[in-house]
Image (tube, rainbow, N blue to C red):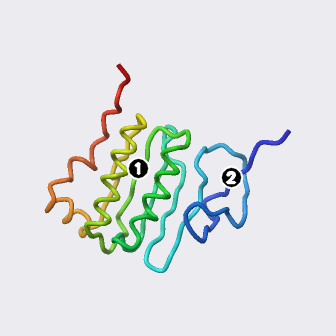
Amino acid sequence: MTAPRVPDSRTSLSGPGQAPSAASGPAEFPVPLGEVAGPDLAIRLTPGRAGRCRAEVRGEIDTDTAHEVVDALTAALRDGITGVDVVLKDVSFCDCGGLNALLELRLLAEEAGKDLVLAGASPQVLRLLDLTDTTALLTAPARPRRDP
């Protein structure tokens, strides 16, 4: 029996949760790798270190696109990874919808005993985090909840 195959980082998805258009490589990483892309947003998931997932986000995260970020990263958190490193260096705009998405994802990660850490951000994102006093929440690993 052959191992299941997952899309590689060059595979493009037309939307969150849709089947990849092509697949290659053995299933060594539990998260479906690839890109979710739209006119204003692109998300690329790749393997990180120590069983983590690296999520690179480009474009605009606003009330219209925030759900795409939540969908893609929630799927990653459900799979067998230890956490997600989110890179927002190429995010040109982020509003309250984007901030709420990041905070929601951090909470979901914490509840799953994993962490979600901001591994880089554009000046626009850093300004939003500074103005809302949320920088520390997204730049330090969450302490996973422990069952009593």
Q: In the displayed structure, would residue 61 be above or below residue 83?
A: below
The residue where tag 2 is placed is 6
Amino acid type indicated by mark 1? Asp
Left or right of residue 70: residue 27: right
Amino acid type indicated by mark 2? Val
- Say whether marks 2 and 1 touch (CB < 8 Å): no
Q: Residues within 10 Å of mark 1 (few under 14, many from 20)?
A: many
Q: Secondary structure at mark 2?
A: loop
- Across and down, in percent, residue 16 comes to 55, 64
Residue that lies at the very extreme toward the bottom in this rendered image: 39
Q: Nearer the viewer, residue 36 or 17?
A: 17
Q: Nearer the viewer, residue 56 or 37?
A: 37
Residue drawn at (38%, 23%) of the image: 147
Q: In the displayed structure, would residue 68 be above or below residue 135?
A: below
- Asked which quadrant contains residue 30, the reply is top right
The residue where tag 1 is placed is 85
Q: Residues within 10 Å of mark 2 (few under 14, many from 20)?
A: many
Residue that lies at the very extreme toward the top in this rendered image: 148
- Across and down, in percent, residue 140 comes to 27, 43
- Across and down, in percent, residue 13 comes to 61, 67
Q: Which part of the image, by quadrant, shows the N terminus? A: top right
